[in-house]
Amino acid sequence: MTTLVTGATGNTGRHVVRELVSRGEKVRAVTRDADAARALLGPEVEVFTGTHNVPSTLDDAWHGVDRLHVTVTAGLADAGTELIGKAVDAGVRRITVVWGGGVGPVEKAIENSGAEWTRLEPQEFMSNTLTWLDAIRADGIVREPYAHPSALVHEADIGAVAAVALLEDGHAGHAYNLTGPQALTPPQRLTILGEAAGREITFATITHQQAVERLMATGVSKADADYVIGWYAESSPASYTVDPTVEQVLGRPARTFAQWAAEHGHRFG
């Protein structure tokens, strides 16, 4: 049988694919850029060109598929119900979903689909650190409005939890809060990252409005910029409280930020 993975070259999707392949599973990876996906994911993976935001592009992808992994991304809310309906009609019986930060239309459609489902609720990805890449390369200073702690989770652990939930019984109907093993402030993360990159990286505070305007300058709408910066301004206990779910599901400790930094530190040098 086959698992269809949407967003297969994304921050989490690629790790779901790799974890499934490492377990000897057949994977069909959905992507807009087939050549890039083949280079990234390797020859063991069947690549299908399409997007979950337009479910009709996947009409030929469902043959032999009994498991589905979905990452909720911008634009999926309007198409999610159709996507899940097509999946279930095609014979999908088990679904994992990386939520979009709340239980929205896609998450609800999956809950009501009749398929076995597991919702993954990561609080913040360690890969969000890559948004600092240009600033660190420019002058070694990260400028943010807030320095609240966050129990960031390694995206590879999200992929591993998804693979377990797709392949093993006992996870249906669960919503898993996923964190890493430490709550770290941005300055603490930068100290760890600086050690891995072999350079000094410092933190400087800017205003909330400056952060919003900076995000809008990249093409993000004001509403979305307000939402993103507001999330950091009013961090919930779930975002900084270490949760043991990753270790409980995987049977090993969650990856640390130091491990992530060791993997990516060369990019910040």
Image (cartoon, helix red, strand yellow):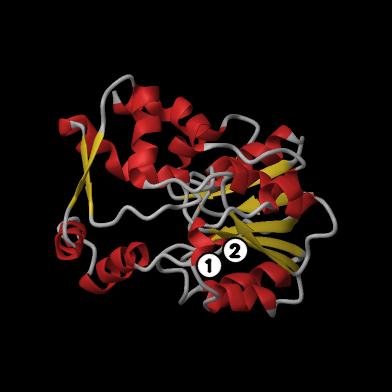
**Local crowd at mark 2 within 10 Å, few (<14), some, or many (≥20)?**
some
Spatial distance from mark 2 to mark 1, Cα to Cα? 7 Å
**On the rendered structure, is 192 left or right of 134?**
right
Image quadrant where residue 197 sits: top left
Q: What residue is drawn where x is 69% and y is 80%?
A: 112
Residue pointed to by mark 1: 55
User: Which dot marks residue 109?
Assistant: none
- Residue 163 spot, x, y in % from top left: 70, 47
Eyeballing the image, is 159 above or below 212? above
The image shows a total of numbered marks equal to: 2
- Residue 246 spot, x, y in % from top left: 67, 49
Residue pointed to by mark 2: 59
Amino acid tagged 2: Asp
Which-is-in-front pick, marks 2 and 1?
Answer: 1
- Residue 107 spot, x, y in % from top left: 59, 73
Amino acid tagged 1: Pro
Image quadrant where residue 25 sits: top right
**On the rendered structure, is 210 left or right of 133?**
left
Q: Secondary structure at mark 1?
A: helix
Q: What residue is drawn where x is 73% and y is 42%?
A: 26
Q: What residue is drawn where x is 59% and y is 37%?
A: 255
- In the rendered image, is residue 219 in sight? yes
The reply to whether discs 2 and 1 touch (Cβ–Cβ < 8 Å) is: yes
